[in-house]
Image (cartoon, rainbow, N blue to C red):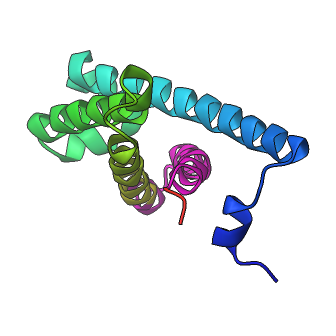
């Protein structure tokens, strides 16, 4: 049985190339969704009054405004990092991988916050975001 690394370096048949191209397109689609969601969420955390955020999310009323605004800045930076390969291929994948790892960590923490706060719809949203971000992280990691 061939290992994962051997199967990735095997000669590419037309069918294998087509599957690789489809996977690449699917990953870019997921990366676009992730970037749009977190750019919008970060922008909302930076611009919305705390009263509105507290109505929508609950947790902002329990922390300082600086923490909420800081989370917004981090979300926007990570959203841009997910799309970084579009801006320059010379940089490589590391900004994408760092950003995807940061988003997985943030989504995991917020999943716990929302579960603990009994915000089921927000917990489900974070679970879906994890289900989108983890394949991007795993699918974009460097070959062996």
Placement of 143 over or under 74, stated as above or below: below
The quarter in which the N terminus is drawn is: bottom right
Q: Residue furthest right?
A: 15
Q: Residue at x 32, y 21 (%)?
A: 44
Q: Residue furthest bottom?
A: 1
Q: Residue at x 70, y 35 (%)?
A: 26
Q: Residue furthest front?
A: 11
Q: In the rendered structure, does residue 135 fall within the stretch colored magenta?
A: yes
In depth, the one of 67 and 11 nearer the eye is: 11
**Helix, strand or loop: magenta stretch:** helix
Q: In the rendered structure, does residue 140 fall within the stretch colored magenta?
A: yes
Q: Residue at x 69, y 70 (%)?
A: 6
Q: Residue at x 42, y 35 (%)?
A: 82
Residue numbers of the magenta segment: 112-141
Placement of 71 over or under 144, stated as above or below: above
In depth, the one of 83 and 39 nearer the eye is: 83
In depth, the one of 144 and 59 nearer the eye is: 144
Left or right placement of residue 16 versus residue 33 in this view: right
Placement of 65 over or under 138, stated as above or below: above
Q: Position of residue 130 (x, y in %)?
A: 54, 52
State the count of labels.
Answer: 0
Q: Position of residue 70 (x, y in %)?
A: 16, 36
Placement of 3 over or under 50, stated as above or below: below
Q: Position of residue 72 (x, y in %)?
A: 25, 31
In depth, the one of 43 and 53 nearer the eye is: 43
């Amino acid at each position: 049985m061939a290992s994962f690394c051997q199967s990735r370096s095997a000669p590419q048949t037309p069918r294998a190339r087509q599957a690789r191209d489809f996977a690449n397109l699917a990953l870019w689609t997921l990366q676009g969704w992730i970037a749009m969601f977190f750019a919008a969420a970060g922008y909302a955390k930076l611009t919305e009054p705390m009263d509105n955020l507290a109505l929508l999310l609950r947790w902002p009323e329990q922390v300082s405004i600086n923490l909420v605004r800081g989370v917004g800045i981090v979300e926007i930076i990570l959203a841009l990092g997910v799309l970084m390969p579009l801006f320059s291929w010379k940089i490589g994948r590391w900004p994408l991988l760092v950003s995807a790892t940061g988003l997985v960590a943030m989504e995991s923490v917020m999943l716990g916050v929302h579960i603990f706060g009994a915000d089921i719809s927000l917990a489900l949203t974070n679970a879906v975001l994890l289900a989108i971000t983890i394949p991007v992280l795993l699918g974009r990691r460097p070959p062996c």
